[in-house]
Every structure is written in C-alpha cells, then in structure tokens.
Image: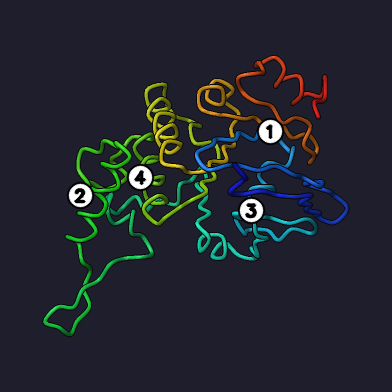
Amino acid sequence: MSYLIETKNITKRFGGLVAVDKMSFGVKEGEVVAVLGDNGAGKSTLIKMISGVYTADGGSVFYNGSEAIIHTPMDALAMGIETIYQDLALAENLNVYSNIFLGREKTKKKFGIFPVLDHEFMYDESTKILNKLDVKIPSLKNNVRTLSGGQRQAVAISRSIYWNAKVLIMDEPTAALGVAQQKQVLDLVNSLKDHGIAIILISHQMRDVFAVADRIIVMRRGMKVGDLIKKETSTEEVVNLIVGSEMVS
C-alpha cells in the first residue's frame, strides 16, 4: 500500500537556521506514525509545513501519490489534512455540537426568508459522528468548558473526522491529561485507525507512542535519524536515537 501523505526532502530555513533538513517520510491509510525528538528537533516545523502554516523552502509534499500545493491552512483543509494543536481551538462558551460546526455552521430559512442556525441538524449530525467514534459525552448541549480534558480532545477529533479528515495531525494529544483521560484519547486513536485515517502523532509520552503507533520517526537537529517499526524496536533504542547515541538508516 502506498503512502496517503508523504514528504520528500522537505526543508525549512529561518535565516541561517535549518529547522527541517531534507526530511522524507510517509503515512499510509489506517496507520499511526509517531514523530519524536527533543525540543528543537524540528517536529513542530515539520507538521506546520504539512498543514500549510509554513511554506517549505525545498522538497515536496505528496498526497495520494500526487504533489500537493499547500500554501495555507485552508489548502490543507481542502485536501482533508486536519491538525489538532494542544490548545484544541475549541470555543469553551459554546456547546459540543456548536463546536463541531464551529465556523461551518448549518443554517436554514425561517419563514422562507431569514437565515437562522439549524440547531436540530447540527445536534443530530454531531450525535452521529460521536456515536460512530464511540465517544461518550454526557450531553451535547453542555458547554465545552464543563468537559474533561479527554472529552475535549474527543470533541476536537470528532469535528475533524466529521469534516472528512483523511490525514489527522495530533500535537501532544495527551499532554496534561490524567491517566483515565489519556486512555480515552488513545482508545479513540485506535478507533480512527480502524476507520482508515492516516495519523501523524507528535508526543513526548513514550508510553502513549508504544500504545498506538505503528511506526516511529525520530528527528534530531532537523533531520530524520530513525524510521522504526514499533514492534521491532524498544524504548531504549528510541531514546538513544533522540539523544544521539546511535543512528538507524
């Protein structure tokens, strides 16, 4: 099976600093690829190029075998590439279904003239996607601020999947979550694999990576220093690559 999303020799410079240096890797449908590295390794810059926040200075991104033109986040979204950052981009003063449709609200005509929000449609559609992903939320009418950290992650993920995400980039999804909430998010990641979503996972949590990843990419000083199959590696090997004790081609 070929890669759904792939980078070839992608490079980003900030002045004299090479933040990402000829980085090549890919992710297949239904695969979770974790990208690991110490602070400053280039992980965030890499995903920002894929998601359209930064424009690469060299190399290419390929989507479904064809070179992708990604100059803005809207370009990435139009292709089905969604990114969930640590802040989740949720409106805490709005309820669950309003967040799933945030910025893409469904309207209907009142009296055949005046456009008004179609709350019933958004509620029903949000219920369907949450049920599909087996996400448990007490009430979709509750404001997001009342939800746990794990439930908020689930809402952000469900929003991306509802809007036809094919590639999901997750930036530290279990950061600052309790053990039970971490398990909830990791269970959801495994569910997304079953739905054929290609997932790029950025994380410092080695236990989480080994729980859900199929492959592990290690970056150091902007370069790829390891591309490992999870079942064939160990925490010790990954840590050694991160700190520079060994290199795997």
4 or 1: mark nearer the eye: 1
Residue 217 circle label = 1
Q: Are discs 1 and 2 less than 8 Å apart at CB? A: no
Amino acid identity at mark 1: Ile
Numbered badge on residue 141: 2
Query: Looking at the rendered structure, which numbered label has been put on residue 39?
Result: none
What is the number of the mark on residue 50?
A: 3
> Going from the N terminus, do you reach mark 3 or mark 1 first?
3
Q: Horizontal and vertical percent for residue 233? A: 67, 18
- Residue at (51%, 64%) from the top-left corner? 78
Q: 64 or 59: which is nearer to us?
A: 64
Looking at the rendered structure, the kind of residue marked 2 is Lys
Residue 167, position in %: x, y? 52, 48
Going by the numbered disc 3, the residue's amino acid type is Ile
N-terminal of the pair, mark 1 or mark 2, is 2
Secondary structure category for the residue under label 4:
helix
Give the residue displayed 63% in from the left and 53% down from the top. Answer: 50
Q: Nearer the viewer, mark 1 or mark 2?
A: 1
Alpha-carbon span between mark 3 and mark 1: 15 Å
Question: How much space separates mark 4 and mark 3, taking CA atoms?
Answer: 23 Å
Q: Amino acid at mark 4?
A: Val
Question: Would residue 244 appear left or right of 199 to someone viewing this image?
Answer: right
Secondary structure under the numbered disc 1 in the rendered image = strand
